[in-house]
Amino acid sequence: MAEPILDILNFDNIISLAVKTLAVIFLIVIFNSFLGIITQSLLRKAKTKKQISNVEIFSQIFKYIFILLVVVFAVLSYSGAWSGFGIFLGLLSAAIGFALQKPITGIAAWMMVVAKRPFDIGDRIFLGDIKGDVTDITLTHIHIAEIGGIIDGEESSGRIVLVPNSLMFEKNIINYTYNHDFVFDSVITTVTYESNLDHAIEIVRESARTKLGKFIARSPSEPRIRLDFMPSGIDVQVKYFSPSRELHEYSSRITKEIFDRINEAPDVEIAYPHTEVVFRRKA
């Protein structure tokens, strides 16, 4: 045990180690300077946020790969253990394979999307707890233009969510537009028991038909009415197929049309929580 230690502490070995260490540092400094010049040149030419991000990310990747190769080469050169290089590569491959389980699963999921086509770019989907329109499908991620998110409703949040492809093997996928571009929606209007119910039904139905006009011919069915007894009145619910990307827009238009028509109708009133005191004479 003493001899190897003495070999390491040998003056010639120390000089050799110092020279190789300085050579490694020199190479890394030169490479970083050269890479920095190229990176700055590319950043000046980059126009978009994505281009800037690509330049910075690939610059980091090249730097780390170069440092790893230089260090490995220096260590093996100093030790003279080139025979162990194959073992090192085998262990490195195994480690990379273990670390990349999710990305590999993501690539398999991408192949499933290409073959089975559960959705396409432009479809509105619900994947796990993320809802939105698919804008891109890559080897590792699905890019989704989120709807809802931090706010209620079907409005676009303006955010792009990158969902790992591997989640497709773990979560349910709901495709709003798999068969057509329409989704079933509804608007509920509660009218008082004293209202003319037939007139209320006509107002609600015609309001939906008016606002959906051009889509009714292409949608799977006509607007339909459903009624329910409620404590304060009768719920008149109109169910209809609406363009999947404009659900909130059309429900708002129909609601406004119903409100305006009821205000003009003398025999229909909207029910709302309130207190009414009725005095009766005793017999």
Image (cartoon, grey):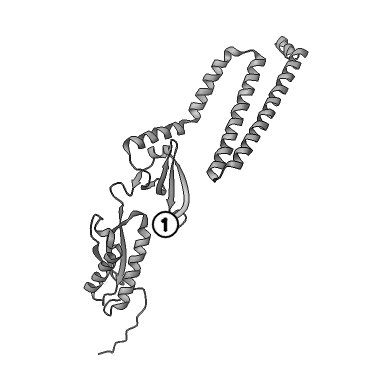
Q: Residue at x 35, y 69 (%)?
A: 256
- Give the crowd class for mark 1: few <14, some 14-19, many >=20 residues within 10 Å: some
Q: Residue at x 23, y 76 (%)?
A: 196
Which residue was labeled with disc 1? Answer: 155
| Residue 236 position within the rendered picture, expressed as x and y whole percent measured from the top left | 27, 67
Quarter in which the C terminus is drawn: bottom left
Give the amino acid at mark 1.
Answer: Glu
Judging depth in this view, the residue of 192 and 112 nearest the camera is 112
Q: Residue at x 35, y 65 (%)?
A: 253
| Residue 88 position within the rendered picture, expressed as x and y whole percent measured from the top left | 56, 19
Which element is circle 1 on?
A: loop
Locate residue 132 relative to residue 218 in the image: left or right: right
| Residue 61 position within the rendered picture, expressed as x and y whole percent measured from the top left | 57, 32
Judging depth in this view, the residue of 23 and 200 nearest the camera is 23
Q: Quadrant of residue 114?
A: top left
Locate residue 67 relative to residue 90 in the image: left or right: right
